[in-house]
Amino acid sequence: MSELIGLLPAAGRGSRLGPIPSSKEVMPLGFELCYPEEDRHAGWRPFTTIESHLHAYRKAGVERVVIVLGSKKTDIMEYLGSGSRYGLHIAYLFQEELRGMPFALDLARPFTHECTTVFSMPDTLIEPHDSIARLSHAHRQVGADLSLGLFETDNPSKFGMVELDNEGRIVRFADKPSATDLRLMWGLAVWSPAFTRFMGDHLADVAKGSPETVLSDILEKALHAGMTVHGVELKGAIYNDIGTPEEFQSVVRKLALRAADSAAESSAAK
């Protein structure tokens, strides 16, 4: 498999959260205590979703990451910097016109066209942190054009749902269905240079002013074009969205309770 390169689209405005003081990707969900053996910058540090993805990329063997920014999102670049403190090299691209996520991803094609791309959404919290490593390993083993990380959900109307055959190949997509018997949503992806080219060629034919192209559209067209699309069920993994105030607050509460339990256990052990 070619070099792994991470791709994070962060150009969206995050309007569902209302007026917020920073980009949602770098709004702290809390603070965590970092020890010297984990990071040379020991001590308390903010815990943000985008940093959780960077740590997961590094764990998966990624060394270079491309982050696509939009208007008023430069605070992400200012916060993350060069990526050196994460053991990564980060490059930033700017999407001048918001035409949907696929167009943001295609901006990275000059940098990713010869690489295996690892894609995740930086406004989500995916646990455990080895989920991306598990997906990239499975992609390498299967040799698919496109591998999707799958999570169980009881709220299919919010997500892109998939149907698998007995060999783990995806045979059908259903984007945010109002009613379905499907139980698996996709939330991560790893794809080959062939899919990078396929997406770019398709987007080149989309006229300005056309209805918004969503990523699930591209995935489905790739399936119908005969590309090998493999699904990897990440059993035990949890996909947390922070796109609305309710979802953001729910994740903050979960992390706070976890930290409190951990502190209580540590105190009891002493």
Image (cartoon, rainbow, N blue to C red):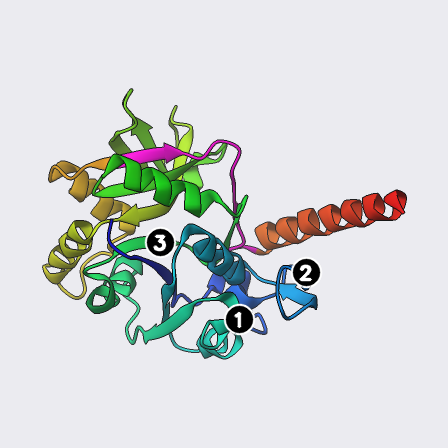
Q: Which of the 4 quarters of the picture holds residue 182?
A: top left
Residue 123 percent location from the top left of the image: 48, 57
Residue 161 belongs to the span the image colors magenta: no
Q: Which residues make up the magenta segment?
A: 230-244
Q: Distance between the residues labelled 2 and 3?
A: 25 Å
Residue 203 percent location from the top left of the image: 16, 59
Residue type at tag 2: Gly
Say which residue label 3 marks: 119
Residue type at tag 1: Arg
Image: 145 above or below 16: above
Q: Please tell me whether mark 2 sits on a helix, a strand or a loop.
A: strand
Say which residue label 2 marks: 30
Q: Please tell me whether mark 3 sits on a helix, a strand or a loop.
A: strand
Residue type at tag 3: Phe
- From the viewer's side, name the closer residue of 62 and 160: 62
Horizontally, is 139 left or right of 208 in the view? right
Can see residue 232? yes
Residue 234 belongs to the span the image colors magenta: yes
Residue 217 percent location from the top left of the image: 23, 46
Residue mark closest to the camera, 2 vs 1: 1
Q: Do the residues labelled 1 and 3 touch (CB within 8 Å)?
A: no
**Residue positioned 42% across, 55% down in the render:** 121
Say which residue label 1 marks: 85
Residue 254 percent location from the top left of the image: 68, 47
Q: Are marks 2 and 3 in contact (CB under 8 Å)?
A: no
- From the viewer's side, name the closer residue of 36 and 203: 36
Tally the marks. Answer: 3
In this view, the residue farthest toward the front is 37
Q: Which of the 4 quarters of the picture holds residue 140?
A: top left
Can see residue 175? no
